[in-house]
Image: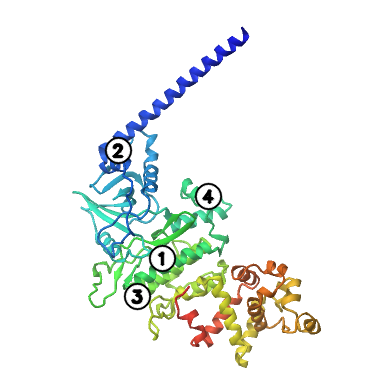
Amino acid sequence: MILVGCVVVWVIRFLCKRKSLKKIRETKRKKKRKVKEQTDSKSGLLCELASSGEEDHVIEEETNAKSARSVLPGKDLSEWYNSVEAVLQFHVDQEDKEIGRMVTNKLFLSSKKIESGSHNGNEVFEGIYERRLVAVKCLDLSRSNDADKNDLEILYKSDDHSNIIRLHGFEHDKDHGYICLERWRCSLDDLIRLTVRQFSKSTKTVAPSDSLEEDMAKFNLWKAVGNPLPLTIKLMRDIVYGLLHLHKLRIMHRDLKPQNVLIISKGETLTAKISDMGICKRLITKDIISFDHLDTCYGSPGWQAPEQILKQKESETIDMFRFGCILFYSITGNHPFGRSSDRDNNITTDNKVNFSQVKHPEASHLINQLLHARPNLRKILGKKKLRKDSIDNHALNHPTFWTANKRLEFLRVASDRLEQADSALLSILRNKAQSVFGGRTWDKKLQKKVLQIIAPGSQQSQQVQVVQQSKRTYDYANIRHLLRLIRNTINHYLEFPPDIQQLLGQVPDGVDEYFASRFPDLLIEIYKVIAKNYKGESQFETYFYGNNI
């Protein structure tokens, strides 16, 4: 009887649980039907997607600079369907709210607003344009201005570059225009404020949004405040590439700032793209018109070059000044010219920047050149050298953007050249030695085991002959001998014992980090010496005139 009673209880519980599950499933089905009815009534396109066909693939995407028509992305559309669901998901539990509307047969405009980025006073929403997730900048046609028209015009001419935000199309109805742009995750300003928050102990530092903080948690920009990681340098290089593209088209951006640099997140990488071309100007050349109606627009306060604030003649160098401000801000979290209320005055009076905040010697040197008060002395992107297809004074050729391999190779070539330096140059090197070493000699920064194997001092000459006849002794107070050590480390790395290789790290990244962390000023000091004395020699052309990063 007890057994029968247990079975009866179990059956009753099972039936109750089954009934409960059935009720939950029915509720979910009703919810889905309601959402589907809403989307059906507003979007024939979304209905088509829901019952999509199978081989819906396309060839490589064209940009508006190549073609007036956007095409589908060249990938499996099932990935895209998941993205569409992500756009609409936030509405599923808000049955009384509007999902969006079909503007044209190509554009579905969501009601979800995008807050990040600078929009020139226009609202921006998520949307779907020709089966592609986009950001839709909405223009009130009754109040449209020259900046909006200019933004659209410049994007049509310049978006065939991976570091310019892509224009997918333009739609309009009776009252509004809709600029359909590549979807971004946040602005550079959002990203840096988030990084400052991570390093700040102050509870007053507010995150741009909780979801952004969660999404960006896997990306690290700084080792410490003022000391950037490679990802930050990569994003800065992206900006320079975008500016170079604009300058080749004879276009000045004129309003570059962190809010106008948008961040695209794809998988494990971030890409920076320039946006908001509202007050761009195209320099007057043959068959190119200057937008004279924008002559009275000078961009956002606090990020302007001195000549913009003083309303003087402009050139592409204003973009480089602005980039210098962005580079400083992206590394330190601070504006180089102080508080917002003081910036314009500090810029026009050439108020000195506190470079001690920047702990990256190469970046500090570049920022110093970019922020020069005299435009003709700034690092630029477009000044041509006599040799065809080379770019003189090119910001991209600065050591800030060099790879580990290029850094080591430069030191190796410089070591060979400085072996024949004259007495005047040797005197300059001696004067730099202690600041580079952080003391009287450089041996204190290396492990004893490394010194014994690859850098024996002159007092160890007899031991050297026993260890290896081919090795030369080193003067630990001589900067040229430190360069020789690095050169020989590169050349003879495979001959070292495994434990020494482990201490040094792999070539090139590990070895570069080993020496750069111990002698952070060495590369930039040698770079300055070579730039002043041997820049024109053939072995150094790639470091000063080439653009092979």
- How far is disc 1 from disc 2 in space, using C-alphas? 44 Å
The amino acid marked with disc number 1 is Trp
Percent position of residue 56, x then y: 32, 49
Q: Crowding at label 1, few (<14), some or many (≥20) Cα neighbours within 10 Å? A: many
Q: Residue at x 45, y 57 (%)?
A: 189
The amino acid marked with disc number 2 is Thr
Q: Secondary structure at mark 2?
A: helix
Vertical arrangement, residue 398 with respect to residue 101, above or below: below
Q: Residue at x 41, y 63 (%)?
A: 257
Locate residue 452: give its quadrant: bottom right
- The residue labelled by disc 3 is 315
Percent position of residue 348, x then y: 42, 72
Which residue is outermost to the top? 1
The N terminus - image quarter: top right
- The reply to whether residue 371 is in sight is no
Mark number, residue 204 = 4
Mark number, residue 303 = 1
The amino acid marked with disc number 4 is Lys
Q: Secondary structure at mark 1?
A: loop
Q: Nearer the viewer, residue 247 or 490?
A: 490
Marked residue nearer the N-terminal end (3 or 1): 1
Q: Residue at x 20, y 49 (%)?
A: 173
- How far is disc 4 from disc 1 in space, using C-alphas? 24 Å
Vertical arrangement, residue 173 with respect to residue 403, above or below: above
- The residue labelled by disc 2 is 39
